[in-house]
Image (tube, helix red, strand yellow):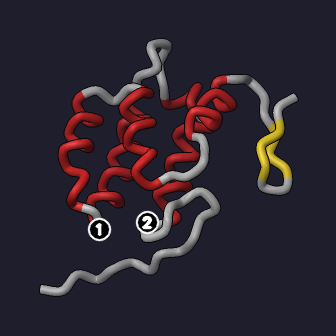
Amino acid sequence: MRRNRAKIHRHRCCKPGYRGELCELLETLLLNSRDFFDKNDCLNSDGRRLLETIIRLLLDEHHEYKELVKRVRKHPCLENILRLSSVFYNCDAYLFYSIGRRSWYSIGNGDIMLG
């Protein structure tokens, strides 16, 4: 049985061979960390829902990360999410998280500018 593979579009932070949608969803999770993480830097229920979407997209094409995904599902805190993101994400995921934790940020010309 042959699977229908989705068209892979490039995202500025995605490693080659991974769907751009993965990186877009990860950025949504991290840039809105006030909405998706609790005070202990673990995901709340909305964050877990978004993480499950990310995991489903990742495992659709890359089954070799099942063990890592199992660990992330068991403890969906920042450290494990950053570990998972290093698989497919080239940009500094922690920077996006810390920007999301602040009450302000601006994005201009594709670059993050603080202050």
| For residue 62, side relative to residue 77 (left or right) | left
Residue positioned most to the bottom? 2
| For residue 76, side relative to residue 64 (left or right) | right
Residue at 52 percent of width and 40 percent of height: 29
* Quadrant in the picture for the C terminus: top right
Question: Which amino acid type is marked by label 1?
Answer: Glu
Inter-mark Cα distance, 2 to 1: 8 Å
Residue underneath mark 1: 61
Residue at 30 percent of width and 56 percent of height: 56
Q: Position of residue 64 (x, y in %)?
A: 22, 57
Asked whether disc 2 touches disc 1, contact meaning CB atoms under 8 Å apart, the reply is yes
Closer-to-camera residue (73/67): 67
Mark 2 Cα shell of 10 Å, populated few (<14), some (14-19), many (≥20): many
User: Please, is residue 11 above or below residue 26 in the view?
Assistant: below
Q: Quick one: label 2 or label 1, which is nearer the N terminus?
A: 2
Helix or strand or loop: what does disc 2 sit on?
Answer: loop
Q: Which mark is residue 18?
A: 2
* Quadrant in the picture for the N terminus: bottom left
Residue at 23 percent of width and 34 percent of height: 71
User: Please, is residue 115 above or below residue 63 in the view?
Assistant: above
Q: Which mark is residue 105?
A: none
Q: Can residue 44 be seen at all in this image of the molecule?
A: no
Question: Which amino acid type is marked by label 2?
Answer: Tyr
Mark 1 Cα shell of 10 Å, populated few (<14), some (14-19), many (≥20): some
